């Protein structure tokens, strides 16, 4: 009952890659308090330039504090990034781009 919403201006990961002319990224580290799937969706055109993606999938999403393991894994596996390692109490996942 105490939840409030606020509009915040954002930019996508694709826009950052394009504006800064990023041709290659060794590691993308995502720690977005449960918004990791949205960030990845905003960067799909440039995922091929990233070697590794580390994602903190801890329980921070929404009112129920759910983790983002399933959503992140489902999305990123479609782009040929198999899981390379996982661990920690924070549910950190490391994905490696098969193109590198």
Image: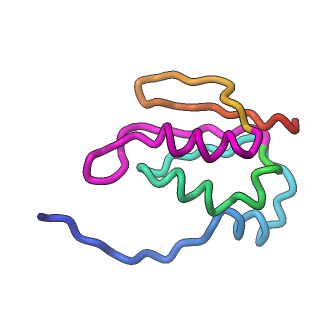
Picture coordinates of residue 69, whole percent (x, y): 49, 37
Q: Could you tell me which residue is drawn at 40 percent across and 40 percent down?
A: 67
Picture coordinates of residue 81, whole percent (x, y): 73, 37
Placement of the N terminus among the 4 image quadrants: bottom left
| Residue 85 on the magenta span | no
| Residue 84 found in image quarter | top right
> In the drawing, does residue 61 fall left or right of residue 86?
left
| Residue 70 on the magenta span | yes
Q: Nearer the viewer, residue 63 or 20?
A: 63
Picture coordinates of residue 4, whole percent (x, y): 23, 70
Q: With respect to residue 94, does 19 lie above or below?
A: below
Q: Could you tell me which residue is drawn at 82 percent across and 34 percent down?
A: 98
Picture coordinates of residue 36, whole percent (x, y): 52, 51
Q: With respect to residue 47, does 90 lie above or below?
A: above
Q: Which residues are magenta?
A: 51-80
Placement of the C terminus among the 4 image quadrants: top right
| Residue 28 found in image quarter | top right
Q: Could you tell me which residue is drawn at 50 percent across and 39 percent down?
A: 70
């Amino acid at each position: 009952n105490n939840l409030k919403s606020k509009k915040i201006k954002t930019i996508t990961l694709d826009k950052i890659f394009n504006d800064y002319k990023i041709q290659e990224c060794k590691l993308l580290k995502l720690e977005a308090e449960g918004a990791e799937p949205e960030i990845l969706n905003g960067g799909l055109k440039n995922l091929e330039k990233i070697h590794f993606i580390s994602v903190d999938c801890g329980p921070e999403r929404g009112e129920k504090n759910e983790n983002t393991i399933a959503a992140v894994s489902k999305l990123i596996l479609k782009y040929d990034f198999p899981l390379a390692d996982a661990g920690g109490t924070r549910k950190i996942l490391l994905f490696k781009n098969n193109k590198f």
